[in-house]
Image (spheres, helix red, strand yellow):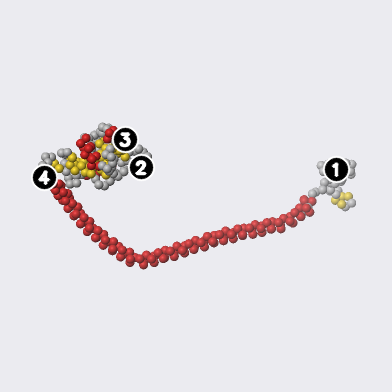
């Protein structure tokens, strides 16, 4: 190794700086052992050939990608736009149809308004006529009350005549259409059918009740007048589950009065519930049946008092 020249000295008119030479005796050629190393080309602003090649292809690829994305976006946007346009077009068509319908309805309303006014006038006249008829019916009802009073007076008069003609010693007689039994009981045998509860109400309206047959005389008289038809009488177990008469008195079971095997409280009739009302069968014996069935009925009341 040569000696270093002092800085600032002149040798051969050349200004020399401190300089180092390669150590040729050093055989270690690794990068770490090299005393003098070359600066990498990147520091000098040079780009490797392989890097330049990659960047040369990147531009066209990115351009193609963006172009493809733009085409897809435009296609989707056009499709959505077409769909929205079709929807708007359909809505406009529906709105036009609705407007046309409303216009037609208004025109028809105007055309029928005169006819509607005429119909209102006709209905008003009809209501006025109906009102006059109701007034007439009201007057007739008042007359019916008077007729009912006359009917009772006629019944009493008939009772008096029968007493004289037949030398009857009974203290009273029965209303028109009713039949006397004994000295104080009148019976009404209906010619139409009703359910048990409605038949009970019918009898109540005449100050009577469905037949209560506690004595053999009453039993024989009623069963003799019902054959060979079916008739409701005032016997039921609907209220308490035990058989009782409509006047609230208990029924004393007499199997001879019932058909064989009855009462059986049969449930197979398809009417719901059980058989809670008693009727006189065609043979004159009792049978339990569903209270909703319509049968003829026997009402029992008191005789009219003779005055």
In depth, the one of 154 and 249 nearer the eye is 154
**Spatial CA span between label 4 and label 3:** 45 Å
Looking at the rendered image, the quarter that the C terminus falls into is top left
User: Dot 3: what SS?
Assistant: loop
**Spatial CA span between label 1 and label 3:** 136 Å
Q: Are marks 3 and 2 in contact (CB under 8 Å)?
A: no
Dot 3, crowdedness within 10 Å: few (<14), some or many (≥20)?
few
**Number of marks in the image?**
4
Q: Which numbered dot is residue 271? A: 2
Quickly name the residue at label 1.
29
Looking at the rendered image, the quarter that the N terminus falls into is top right
User: Dot 2: what SS?
Assistant: loop
User: Dot 4: what SS?
Assistant: helix
In depth, the one of 67 and 132 nearer the eye is 132
Q: Compared with residue 114, is residue 11 higher up or lower down, i.e. above or below?
A: above
Dot 1, crowdedness within 10 Å: few (<14), some or many (≥20)?
few
Q: Earlier in the sequence, mark 2 or mark 4?
A: 4
């Amino acid at each position: 190794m040569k000696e270093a020249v002092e800085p600032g000295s002149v040798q051969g008119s050349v200004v020399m700086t401190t300089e180092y030479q390669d150590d040729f005796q050093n055989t270690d050629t690794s990068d770490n052992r090299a005393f003098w190393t070359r600066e990498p080309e990147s520091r000098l602003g040079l780009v490797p050939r392989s890097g330049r090649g990659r960047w040369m292809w990147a531009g066209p690829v990115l351009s193609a990608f963006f172009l493809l994305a733009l085409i897809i976006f435009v296609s989707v946007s056009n499709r959505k736009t077409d769909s929205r346009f079709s929807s708007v077009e359909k809505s406009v068509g529906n709105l036009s149809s609705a407007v046309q319908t409303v216009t037609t309805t208004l025109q028809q309303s105007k055309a029928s308004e005169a006819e509607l006014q005429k119909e209102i006038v006709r209905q008003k006249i009809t209501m006025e006529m109906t009102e006059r008829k109701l007034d007439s019916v009201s007057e007739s009802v008042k007359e019916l009350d008077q007729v009912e009073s006359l009917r009772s007076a006629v019944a009493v008069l008939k009772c008096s005549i029968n007493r004289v003609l037949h030398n009857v010693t009974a203290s009273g007689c029965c209303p028109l259409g009713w039949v006397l039994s004994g000295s104080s009981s009148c019976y009404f045998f209906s010619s139409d059918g009703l359910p048990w509860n409605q038949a009970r109400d019918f009898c109540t309206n005449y100050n009577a009740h469905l037949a209560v047959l506690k004595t053999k005389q009453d039993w024989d008289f009623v069963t003799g007048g019902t054959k060979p038809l079916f008739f409701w009488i005032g016997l039921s177990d609907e209220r308490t589950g035990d058989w009782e008469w409509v006047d609230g008195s208990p029924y004393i079971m007499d199997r001879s009065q019932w058909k064989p095997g009855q009462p059986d409280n049969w449930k197979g009739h398809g009417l719901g519930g059980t058989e809670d009302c008693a009727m006189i069968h065609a043979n004159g014996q009792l049978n339990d049946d569903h209270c909703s069935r319509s049968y003829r009925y026997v009402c029992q009341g008191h005789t009219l008092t003779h005055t």
